[in-house]
Amino acid sequence: MQLKKEVIRKLPAVRILAGETVVTEGSRDGVLYFLESGTVEIVKEGVSITTVKDSGAVFGEMSVLLDAPHTATVRTLNDCTFRVVENPEEFMIEEPGIAAYVATILAKRLDSLNKYLVDTKSQFQDQDGHVSMVDNILETLMTKHPRTIERREQSGP
């Protein structure tokens, strides 16, 4: 863990003021952002999902790893400092410890999502009608092997 912190601390620092957007849902910038200080809000399709203030939190990794547009918007709630990686694929090859760190963060997110799905599934498994469809959808999500799924285009106002 200490080695990871040392590697991240050597990256260029960028200060982003409160209320600014770091990552925009649907865009591509090919950059990884490691939060050093401050608090950000994660917004998906206009809905606030969560806030993050953990030093070392990483943003932009899904876009980089999937070679796809960003899946959410990251906005600063107060002044934040990020460590920035401009060439993340090359960086993760050169620093496999960072690649493992990013993989660990993604695995923790997936584990949390799986726990949520199991909890939700148990709540709806005995329901009939439309609600039972939720159970079927959750079952599919939990058992299917990941595959490439085209993302739906967002419609404008």
Image (tube, rainbow, N blue to C red):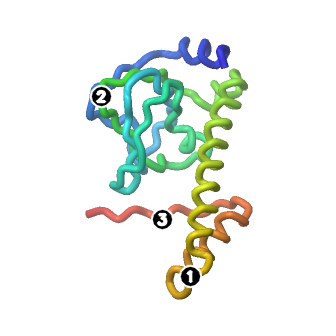
Residue 82 horizontal/vertical position (percent) = 44, 23
Residue 119 horizontal/vertical position (percent) = 59, 62
Q: Earlier in the sequence, mark 3 or mark 1?
A: 1
Residue 126 horizontal/vertical position (percent) = 61, 80
**Element type at mark 2:** loop
Residue kind at label 1, given as amino acid type:
Gln
- In whole angstroms, how far apart are the C-alphas of marks 2 and 3? 32 Å
The numbered dot on residue 127 is 1
Q: Quadrant of the C terminus?
A: bottom left
Q: Nearer the viewer, mark 2 or mark 3?
A: 2
Q: Are marks 1 and 2 in contact (CB under 8 Å)?
A: no
Residue at (52, 87) in percent of width and height = 129
Q: Is residue 137 above or below residue 101?
A: below
Residue furthest bottom in the image: 129
The numbered dot on residue 72 is none
Residue 115 or 82: which is nearer the viewer?
115
89 sits left or right of 13 in the view = right
Residue 152 horizontal/vertical position (percent) = 48, 65
The numbered dot on residue 78 is 2
